Image (cartoon, coloured by chain):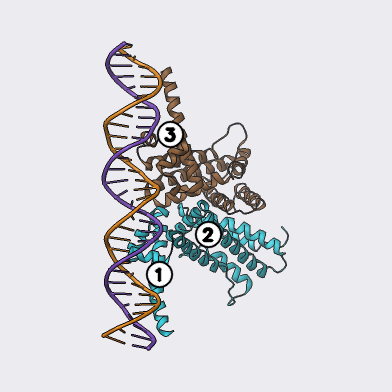
Chain colours: A cyan, B brown, C orange, D purple
DNA sequence: GCTGACATTGAACGAGTGTTCAATACTTTT
DNA sequence: AAAAGTATTGAACACTCGTTCAATGTCAGC
């Protein structure tokens, strides 16, 4: 098992380098830029190895989609190290953190959304991740404002997500930083609004 | 010239059927679904004719991009038939009109954004259209609220666009109609806010 | 050292791609 | 009626694509 661990480690190294290469190409050149050969070149491996670890091109893309979705879910993951209100506030501000507002990440998200729109299989994965994100955000709201019904929390989460998606998308088009900050303030306003509006 | 008009009409018929086919394929299957042969099949013409009217595949896509951009610009075009405040309000509500929130249109916009992100040439066209949209919206705000400085109008327009883009994108993921309506109310709130905030 | 299991390679295949172009149909001009 | 101009066709070209596969490399266990 110890040897297998090393083995697995090596495997993981190559396999994740392939996945990373696919993510990189997707964010830079869109789906048309992601050919099995380009991925192999970018990862520094032979063409055959890509098909060794990922049966299909489809399953490679699926892996990429899941990888990004997981990353997104972390944004609304509970964080026991701070109080409920602070947790919510931090989650809302995280979406404008420096590492998220990079072209690489935003572009990746955009291309994955476009893929999900064109293909039913990808769409399901995406819709599920979207729902879990909404749930996570609603849970944070619920913790911070215990007086709200769960339905009201989902409602606020939905409104917040609209603005967050808008921020991500518009950031790609080069809207100024100040507008992003005002939008974040708007999400906080929704989240922390007094009980019945 | 009369004859040429007929001629041009026929030309337009075939040429615009080709463009329409390209738009349709793009919105349904993404850029991978738009091959010259698929466009020809969808438009009911021979393969060669697509290259006759559009030199490149690139110029066909460019035409599609411009077509959608023009359509978007109409949303914030001045409408002399009603007062300035009503004009602004109608423009803000138009983005949630039935014909805009269709999957076809939203999906098309998404794929074109993705294309613009992957290709420098498309990006320029898109950025320019975005800027003109922002300008148009700011002008509507300025007319409705003459007391605001132009800079303040641009600021409000930027904030509104963030939410509008979020609505378009999130509508694709299936957020409920109620959330869309609340988001529209939010854009009106920004637009019609009293002078200094 | 040998064996067997896994990792890795690159050549090969058939299908699909964008583009070109000679040939044909249709209209208008002379 | 002939000529000229434009519209339209589909075959052909040179590529690239995803996938398969036999061959080779690597290395732990016997």
Please determine if labels 1 and 3 lie on a single subunit: no
Give the x, y percent position of residue B129: 46, 43
The disc placed on residue A100 is none
Viewer-side label of 1, 2? 1
B50 over A191 or under it: above or below: above
Query: Is residue A196 left or right of A128 when viewed as pictured?
Result: right
The disc placed on residue B45 is 3
Give the x, y percent position of residue A5: 42, 81
Cα distance between the residues tagged 3 and 2: 51 Å
Residue identified by numbered label 2: A181
Q: Chain of mark 2?
A: A
Please determine if labels 1 and 2 lie on a single subunit: yes
Q: Answer whether residue A187 is visible to the viewer in this image.
A: yes
How dense is the environment of label 2, judged by Cα within 10 Å: few (below 14), some, or many (20 and up)?
some
A184 over A1 or under it: above or below: above
- Quick one: quadrant of the N terminus of chain A? bottom left
Q: Chain of mark 3?
A: B
Q: Chain of mark 1?
A: A
Residue at disc 3, secondary structure: loop
Residue ID at (37%, 71%): A14
How dense is the environment of label 3, judged by Cα within 10 Å: few (below 14), some, or many (20 and up)?
some
Residue at disc 1, secondary structure: helix
Residue identified by numbered label 1: A15
Please determine if labels 3 and 2 lie on a single subunit: no
Q: Are marks 1 and 2 in contact (CB under 8 Å)?
A: no
Cα distance between the residues tagged 1 and 2: 38 Å
Residue ID at (66%, 61%): A154
Query: Is residue C30 left or right of A27 when viewed as pictured?
Result: left
Cα distance between the residues tagged 1 and 3: 45 Å
Give the mark nearer the N terminus: 1 vs 2: 1
């Amino acid at each position: 098992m110890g040897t297998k661990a090393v083995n697995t480690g090596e495997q993981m190294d190559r396999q994740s380098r392939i996945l990373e290469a696919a993510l990189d190409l997707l964010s830079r050149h869109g789906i048309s830029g992601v050919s099995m050969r380009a991925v192999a070149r970018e990862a520094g491996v032979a063409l055959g190895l890509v098909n060794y670890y990922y049966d299909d091109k489809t399953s490679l893309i699926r892996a990429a989609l899941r990888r990004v979705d997981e990353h997104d879910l972390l944004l609304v993951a509970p964080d026991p190290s701070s109080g409920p209100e602070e947790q919510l506030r931090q989650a809302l501000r995280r979406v404008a953190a420096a590492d998220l507002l990079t072209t690489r990440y935003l572009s990746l998200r955009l291309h994955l959304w476009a893929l999900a729109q064109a293909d039913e299989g990808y769409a399901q994965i995406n819709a599920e991740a979207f729902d879990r994100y909404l749930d996570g955000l609603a849970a944070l709201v619920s913790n911070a404002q215990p007086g709200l019904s769960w339905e009201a929390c989902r409602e606020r989460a939905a409104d917040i997500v609209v603005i967050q998606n808008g921020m991500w998308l518009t950031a790609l088009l080069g809207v100024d930083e100040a507008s992003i900050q005002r939008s974040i303030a708007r999400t906080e306003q929704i989240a922390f609004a007094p009980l019945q509006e």
